[in-house]
Each structure stands twice: as structure tokens, then as C-alpha cells.
Amino acid sequence: MEVPRDPRQLNIQVPPEISRMILKCMEKDRNKRYQAVEELLAELRKIEKDLPTTDKILPKKKTKLKIKRKRFRSFIVPATLLFVAIIIAGGYFYYDELLQISKKVLPISKKEKEQKSAVIAGQTIQETPAITSQSGYIEISSTPKEAEVYIDDKSEGMTPLKRELSPGTFRIRITKSPEYKEITDVLEIKAGET
């Protein structure tokens, strides 16, 4: 029967207690080995307590892992800051794009409100006087036809359009396609007038 070699013969730095424990684990006779994992763990803890700190060998892999973790941690803060900067820049450009779109909608001047008509990008809007004294009528036409008309942000249909409205103030918006500028105006309808 072959007897395993003493680990101290292979490496002189192995403490004698650990060498005995390894040999006991490698015993061919089961009854001479440790009977439970708890028994082996207790022996390891006892050996660790008895060893002076100078004899304790720390595995090199643990120190390498700590170095890798430190390097990883050193990248977390810059990566997080870069991510936040990208989000802020993206939000700024998105907001700037929204501002550019909103600037395309031109406000109507007081002079144009008084004339009660506007010509923008080939579209003409005309308003006709009220037919009865109890309500007003608005008639909107455009060139080209079939521009979408919104009164108080509610779609009312396509041009040419004629609607009876009760007296009050209304927000009118007319859109066609991206080639044409959107027209917006605030109109006050009085009884018997438009």
C-alpha cells in the first residue's frame, strides 16, 4: 500500500500541523479520516489560532482581487459623472429642439388682428361678419385647401370651414404640413360681430 508523501517534503513552508491535517484527509482507511466537515473545519480553526501571524500565508489571489476592485471602484465615479453629463446634454438638446419647433409658430401682431386676416406661406384666412345678433360665425379658408383647423385646441375639421360660435374669445390654430408655417391667432367673437 502506497503512503502519500508528506506535504513538507514538497514545500518546506507548509506548517507541520497543516501537513498532518492533509495526510489525515488522504488516509486510505476511512475510519482514520475526518468523519464530518465540521470536524475538519474545527481542526482548521484550531491550527489558524495556533499559528503565529508571521507564518500565516495569505494567498496572492486575494491581493490581486483587491487591486482589481480598487481599479474598478476608481472607474465608477468618472463613469457615473459621464453618464449624468450625457443625460443632461441630451435633455438640453431635446429642450432646444422643442424651443426651435415652438419658434416656428409665429404670433399674430396687433395690426394683423385688426385686419382680421393673415397670409402666411400661401395660406389665407378670412373671417366673415356674424349673420345673427345672438351668435357669430367664422369662416376660414386657405390656399391650398384642406388645412387642419383647431378652435381652442379642439379639431374642427379642414378648410374651407364655417362655424357658428357663441360670443367669447377663441384660440384659432391652422396647420397644414411641414412645408407651411402654423398659424395661430386669438379671436374675440361678439354678438352680431365677428
Image (cartoon, helix red, strand yellow):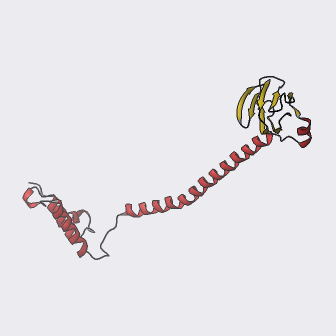
Q: Residue at x 20, y 64 (%)?
A: 41
Provide residue 139's location: percent of width, then percent of height: 82, 27
Looking at the image, residue 110 sits to the left or right of residue 80; the answer is: right
Any part of residue 175 in sight: no
Provide residue 166's location: percent of width, then percent of height: 77, 35
Determine whether 122 is above or below 40 in the image. above
Q: Residue at x 92, y 36 (%)?
A: 115
Determine whether 23 is above or below 128 in the image. below
State which quarter of the image contains the N terminus: bottom left
Looking at the image, residue 188 sits to the left or right of residue 54; the answer is: right
Q: Residue at x 57, y 55 (%)?
A: 79
Looking at the image, residue 105 sits to the left or right of residue 117; the answer is: left
State which quarter of the image contains the C terminus: top right
Q: Quadrant of residue 191?
A: top right
In the image, 178 versus 176, the foreground residue is: 176
Farthest front residue in view? 133
Looking at the image, residue 48 sits to the left or right of residue 165; the answer is: left
